[in-house]
Image: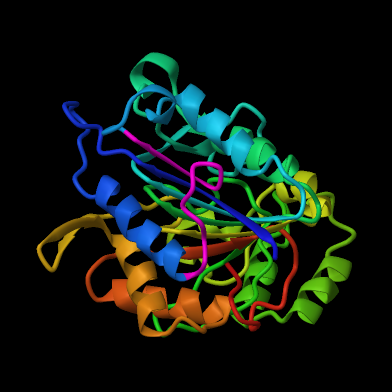
Amino acid sequence: MVRRKSLLIGINYTGSNHALQGCQQDVQNMIQFLVSRGYPTDPQSMVVLSDARSGPFYPNGHNMLAAMDWLISEPGTCNFLHFSGHGGQVRDPDGDRASGFDSTIVPVDFEQNGQLDSDTLHKRLVSRLPPNSSLFVVFDCCHSGSAIELPFVYRTDDDGNVSLVDNVKQGLHLMEAANHLVQGGFSMNKVNDAKVLFAGAQTFFQGLKHRGEAQQEGLGEEHFVEDWKSENKRVFMYSGCKDDQTSADATISGSHVGAMSWAFLQNMRVNPNQSYIEVLQNTRGLLKDRYRQVPQLSVGTQTDLNQLLMI
């Protein structure tokens, strides 16, 4: 049997000016879900970080990175990571983000020691993941769409449809014509044809997901795709919102929870046997009547997302 490991991080930032209410509860709810899916709870298999705990289980930046290192350290494992807390953005030092910002997750000691940016998280969680291991991630925080810089990002439209749109690179002078093609809808074959069509240009136009009203739902690539695309790691991440959105701290049925964590778990309780795409669509369906945030599915390698979700 494949060894299963899990890391759950819930930070309420208790006593600070940035306090949340539902993150610790999110972790407890997620533990129940993981147990129902066969994840063991012994200390060698499940680690929980919370600002209600102390020592190595207190979620400062150092402990969070150490726990991530532990999570993906063994080959041939199936790994699960859940983070519920604040997400943020910091200036992108590498120039591979169209927005000029890297997404972050926020440790409890961020005011003293800073945030954990998406480049760091990718190198820690994805680049170091053994090739015969897998990682499933749920991030319930603001600005989390590309928080670990996976190369392919899926979103649904308001009707739950998932289209395939390639957010190709910056600077194409044929922006208007290219945008017209995108609005007409791409298949993956059309994406490849479009790349051939635009081969004469020096660079391709920037990802549409940072263009406000021109934003297109579907599959997107950021500039870091060129760095990470060849890794082909089996990593799947459901995030609470797009990079330019916030995630809600909610009260549902009298309990303080993160909206994304609640919707994901509620969705999986109703139907535990769904495809990756169905989970995205149905989670969006639960959120859209209550909140403006748009959950995303990010993937480390091109995968048939109509297959049953495996955790």
Color style of the picture: rainbow
| Magenta-drawn stretch contains 169 | no
Give left or right: position of 39 versus 74: left
| Residue drawn at point x = 52 percent, y = 71 percent | 217
Give the answer, above or below, for where 29 lies relative to 52.
below
Q: In which quarter of the image is residue 227?
A: top right
Give left or right: position of 125 versus 39: right
Give the answer, above or below, for where 205 lies relative to 90.
below
| Magenta-drawn stretch contains 41 | yes
How many labels were placed on the picture? 0
The part of the chain drawn in magenta is 37-50
Look at the magenta stretch and give its main secondary structure: loop
From the viewer's side, name the closer residue of 155 and 25. Answer: 25
The reply to whether residue 287 is in sight is: yes
Q: In which quarter of the image is residue 236?
A: bottom right
Give left or right: position of 306 versus 41: right
Residue 232 screen position, x and y as percent: 79, 57
Which quadrant, please, contains the C terminus? bottom right
Which quadrant, please, contains the N terminus? bottom right
Residue 191 screen position, x and y as percent: 77, 73
| Residue drawn at point x = 53 percent, y = 46 percent | 147
Give left or right: position of 148 versus 172: left
| Residue drawn at point x = 57 percent, y = 37 percent | 68
Residue furthest to the top: 112
Residue furthest to the left: 254
Residue 187 screen position, x and y as percent: 72, 81
Residue 167 screen position, x and y as percent: 66, 61
The reply to whether residue 96 is in sight is: no
